[in-house]
Amino acid sequence: MGYKKDLLILPFDHRGSLLKKLFGVEGREPTSEEAEKYADLKHMVYEGFLQSLEMGVPKEKTAVLVDAQFGEKIISDAKKRKIMVAMPVEKSGQEEFDFDEQDFRGHIKRVDPDFVKVLVRFNPEEKGDLNTRQLKRLRQVSDFSREIGKKFIFELLVPPLPKQLATLGDTYDLELRPKLMVKAIRQIQDAGVEPDVWKLEGVSKKDDSQALVAQCHAKGRTSGIITLGRGEDANKVKEWLKVGAKINGIIGFAVGRTIFWEPMKNLNSKKISRKEAINQVANNYKQLVDLWESERSK
């Protein structure tokens, strides 16, 4: 159990949110033409990832996080190149966690990724049975991942409840969210859900980072933490990475839209060439890897 090695993920498993932004797809499945275009845009991101490896990004520390729906060819190629692959199993765009494929076990076995990933919105002060329902499903995927020897990545988002936002406003992110994250992790662990890697929103204070690591390592656990980008601007992401790189137990990052969104959007609207888009993705990713490596070595 657990994961201790550095892990620097380029995630582009986004589905519903970017289908809406790029093609206006909402409340329906994409047409075959839209699906083909989106798959091709994802492949551009993958080509940028491959170029970054040629530029010196250490392959053994990296992974791509991509969905099988639009990234089947990417997953197949990455496995041939012995690049680590993470795959989501959650239904895209849902407030409540549920499986993308009801036969999620068969889906995982067919794709055979290195990491199984879930994204869950979980506020530990939520009343009612929402969290209970989510934890029941999460226990299933946690147990199955362990059973078949797959590493399990848990992406935890802690959205504010209305009363929390009303009380704290813009200070929620800095003052309350880190404490709620610790509380959420404890509740998830107590329910028997055991991630190998926690994919967490960044925090700006060293003490908050240390508190998260302490909870993830409670009772002898060895789970690693990677910092997600949350679509933030590059400066905010760099701030988070500088904090995390110096904390024992934080092992890397998973930053996606900050790296690929502008190149993807501009390529789709034909404002830049495919080569330019690939170069931008490669350079953006390498900059964050270089920052992580530099801060890690201090």
Image (cartoon, rainbow, N blue to C red):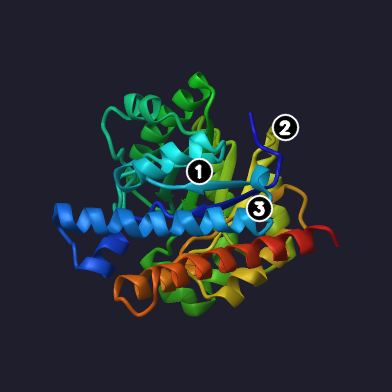
Q: Which mark is residue 154?
A: 1
Quarter that holds the C terminus = bottom right
Residue labelled with disc 3: 252
Label 2 Cα crowd, 10 Å radius (few <14 / some 14-19 / many 20+): few
Foreground disc of the pair 2, 3? 3
Q: How many labels does the image show?
A: 3
Give the spatial CA distance, label 1 vs label 3.
14 Å
Residue 177 at x, y percent in the picture: 54, 63
Foreground disc of the pair 1, 3? 3
Q: Please report whichever mark, 1 or 2, sits nearer to the chain's N-terminal start.
A: 1
Report the front residue among 293 and 179: 293
Q: Please report whichever mark, 2 or 3, sits nearer to the chain's N-terminal start.
A: 2
Give the spatial CA distance, label 1 vs label 2.
18 Å
Residue labelled with disc 2: 220
Quarter that holds the N terminus = top right
Give the spatial CA distance, label 2 vs label 3.
20 Å
Q: Residue 121 carries which label?
A: none
Secondary structure at badge 1 equals: strand
Q: Is residue 68 above or below residue 40?
A: above
Amino acid type, mark 1: Phe
Residue 59 at x, y percent in the picture: 64, 46
Residue 80 at x, y percent in the picture: 50, 34
Query: In the drawing, does residue 198 fall left or right of residue 160?
Result: right
Residue 178 at x, y percent in the picture: 59, 61
Which residue is most to the right?
Answer: 298
